[in-house]
Amino acid sequence: MDDIKTTIHEDATNDQMLADPGTDKTKTLTCCVLSLILQYNVDPETILLLIFTRLAAARLKDKIKKVLKPLGKAKPQVSIIRP
């Protein structure tokens, strides 16, 4: 696990994850979001995920949708950050 450099900053309402390429950021973020929705009953419509690339956003949306759609749950908003 020494090769994974992940920093998570959190306050009362926001989380930020910074990590090197190839460190499973998408998997980690997917698990965190699904945990919030399924275990803590957070309304998915109150969650905003900001991603840097279209590919990462598409992968994240797909992974979350595969779990939430069969359960009839709404999906959180996933948007791309554009400088």
Image (cartoon, rainbow, N blue to C red):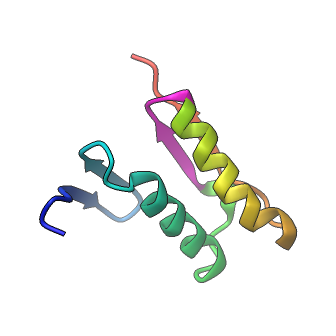
The quadrant in which residue 36 appears is bottom right
Residue 5 x, y percent position in the rendering: 17, 56
Q: Which residue occupies 84% across, 73% down?
A: 71
Residue 44 x, y percent position in the rendering: 67, 60
Residue 50 lies in the magenta stretch: yes
From the image, which quarter does the C terminus lie in?
Answer: top left
Closer-to-camera residue (29/39): 29
In the image, the segment drawn in magenta is 47-54
Q: Is residue 55 above or below residue 70?
A: above
Residue 72 x, y percent position in the rendering: 87, 68
Of all residues shown, which one is farthest toward the top?
83
Q: Is residue 20 above or below residue 39?
A: above
The quadrant in which residue 3 appears is bottom left
The quadrant in which residue 4 appears is bottom left
Q: Is residue 59 above or below residue 42?
A: above
Closer-to-camera residue (31/82): 31
Q: Which residue occupies 51% across, 68% down?
A: 31
